[in-house]
Structure formats: structure tokens, C-alpha cells
Amino acid sequence: GKAEGAVKSSGLDWVIFRPSVVFGDGGEFVSFTKRLKGMFAPGVPLYPLPGNGETRFQPIWVGDLVPMLADAVEGDDHAGETYRIGGPEKLTLREITEMVYDAENKSITIVPLPMGLAGVGLTVLGAVPGFPMGKDQYRSLQFDNTTDRNDVGVFGVDTSSMKTLGAYLGERN
């Protein structure tokens, strides 16, 4: 996009990371799924998911990502490179949502929300202060956020050694 173009034409050394969603302590990713449910149906175990939650992500644990970022900043051999980075597994938003609630031994019923209806609703509700989604998030849910070319190997990382979202959630509870 425009930001990457500005960075590339800046005349400075640069490295661009394009990670999928990042999870970890203090992060927004896991808590986002809970806030979204609460906004739609506080106290009710119904969870509306745009597009039936079929958008795919490749979540990466912040503890796996940070050493790669440090390596890129400290080493000269990464200047001018763009890296696509993802975690060890590709999951749908539906699978992620179910994992978050299963880890807390809570049950939910996912209610499919057609993308068109979600778009109208999120555009309107996005103007409400504190609402966790808006039209930008709606747009991002229309495309998978995964990579077929996972560049973690450039940093000497094997995806089999990376922390999965399920393992992280299990450690938290």
C-alpha cells in the first residue's frame, strides 16, 4: 500500500514484515473475540460471525515473532526485504472463536451472519465509541490473512517449533 511505498522510497534501509494476526499476553487478538460477542449479545451464549467465520488466519505468537524482528533490525542482510510471516497453523475465525471459549470451558452457539448484512451493521456500529469492529475490519474479513510463502525459515525457525494458539490458550487457563 501507500505506507510500504513511502518506506521503500525513503532512501533509508528498511525491512517490512507482513504478519498474520499476532497473539500473546496483553494483546488484542484473543480478547477481541470475547468483546465482539459481548457487544452483540451480553450474557447470551450466541455469537454472530460474519460470513459464518470462514475467513482464515495464521496466528503467530508474539514470542515467536519478536526474535525475528530483532534479527531483521540487527542484521544487515535483511535490508530491502519484505517477509510474509505466519504461525504454524491456518485456522478459520470460527475455529479460533471456538478454541477461545473451549479453553475457558464455556460453550457458545455460533450464528452465521451473511457478509452483506455484517457490512451494513459494522459500518453503522463502527461509529459507536468502544465498538470493537467497523468497516475496516469488515473489509479485512472478506479476505484470508494467511501466507503460502511463510518466511519464518529465513530466520532459522521451523514452524513445528512455534507455539500454536491452542497451546497458548491452554497455558493461560
Image (cartoon, rainbow, N blue to C red):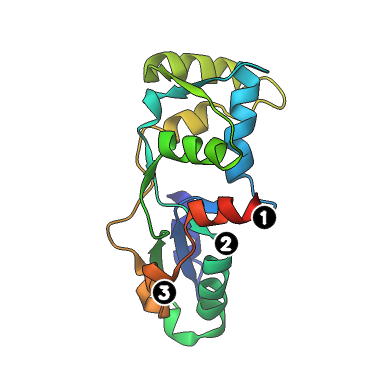
- Element at label 1: loop
Q: Earlier in the sequence, mark 1 or mark 3?
A: 1
The residue singled out by tag 3 in the image is 80
Residue 77 x, y percent position in the rendering: 43, 85
Total marks shown come to: 3
Residue 69 drawn above or below residue 149: below
Residue 9 shows up from this direction: no
Q: CA distance from mark 2 to mark 3?
A: 23 Å
> Mark 2 vs mark 3: which is more N-terminal?
2
Q: Is residue 54 above or below residue 113?
A: below
Residue 172 location in percent, x, y?
65, 52
Residue, x 39% and y 60% (percent of image)? 88
Q: Which residue is mark 1?
A: 25
Observer-side mark, 2 or 3, equals: 2
* Of 8 and 124, the residue lying toward us: 124
**130 is higher (above) or lower (below) than 15:** above
Please give the residue where the numbered disc 2 appears in the rendered image: 62
